[in-house]
Image (tube, rainbow, N blue to C red):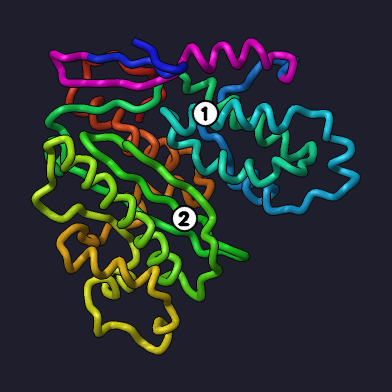
Amino acid sequence: MEFVGTEFHQDLDRGLCELKAPGYWSSAAEKSSYLFPNGMKTKRSPMSISDERIMLETVSDDEFNEAKILPYRELCGVISYPAACSKLEMRFAVSVCGRFRDKWGAKQFKILTKAFEYGYATRETGLIYSKGFDPHGVNVLSCHADSAHSLPRSQGCHLVVMNGASICCESKRHTATAASTCHDELIRFAKSADKVVGFRNLNCEMGMADEMPTIIYQDNESAIQITLNRGSLSNRSKHMDRTILRSRNKVEDGEVKPTARVTTEMWADIGTKALPDTQFEYLRDKMNGYSLVKEHWPEYKLPSYIT
């Protein structure tokens, strides 16, 4: 039923397996109650658009000296663990907040507490996998890869999905500054292709080899054309290095297949930037499998905030 703070709930009749950590969040909230003297608020997303703008500011020495007594590192660690196990929609917030672990201010700490409040408010959900509902098939991988285009380096995200919900989520800043949106999208495609091939190898070892290429959804047509056609490099894209372009080999070898998807349905968008609450909730419940279960098993008991 439980492993290192994560609870496992199986419904074999319906073919469902749910991972969540309500006990972990309740225990963390009790220990951190002194940080919320007026009680915790109900948050619909871990980070708002205005919060993200604040997290782009530089913390001065005076701000840090005033706030260094605040348990920033400790609270960041508290939300990082479930974000890696069952609350994958929080990976972007953890990535952004993690940049201030060495030097933070009161404003940054306040935003971190908001992310904690979100985790506690949605503690009854995590990830739910379902049998037979994933349109790609049973035990068949798919992936969403997306990137924002910003300075100094863009934030990229990819989600590997199987049986209706994410099994892996990465939300990180790229290590290189891209010259265009297309370049950023190709960087993320290359990273997601490597991750997908690793999961394909793992599935093969477990006797679930994928016979068809794994679909990697992207919302940039130019990037898709470059990955599909060796002759499509123009003067604006010839500077891209081998690390990016070698993902073409995986396409030619039939391991991955780039596929277009509109931005509003790009699940990985949740890990590239802060989103309005409504769009965040929509993508969250797509990537964690709850909207799929709610559609096919409407009588299955789920929290009211599931869209």
Front in this rendered view, residue 79 or 303: 79
Which residues make up the magenta segment?
11-35
Give the residue drawn at x 44%, y 58%.
147
Q: Quadrant of residue 135?
A: top left
Q: Amino acid at mark 2?
A: Gly
Q: Is residue 152 above or below residue 296?
A: below
Determine the secondary structure under disc 2.
strand
Give the residue drawn at x 28%, y 41%.
161
- The quarter of the picture where the N terminus appears is top left
Q: Position of residue 216 (x, y in %)?
A: 26, 55
Which of the labelled discs sits on residue 156, or is there none? 2
Determine the secondary structure under disc 1.
helix
- In the rendered image, the residue lying farthest to the front is 205
Q: Position of residue 118 (x, y in %)?
A: 55, 27
Magenta span has 108?
Answer: no
Structural crowding at the residue carrying mark 2, measured as other residues with C-alpha within 10 Å and reported as few (<14), some (14–19) or many (≥20): many
Q: Amino acid at mark 1?
A: Tyr
Q: Position of residue 142 (x, y in %)?
A: 23, 47
Residue topped by disc 1: 81
Front in this rendered view, residue 189 or 291: 189
Q: Position of residue 107 (x, y in %)?
A: 76, 39
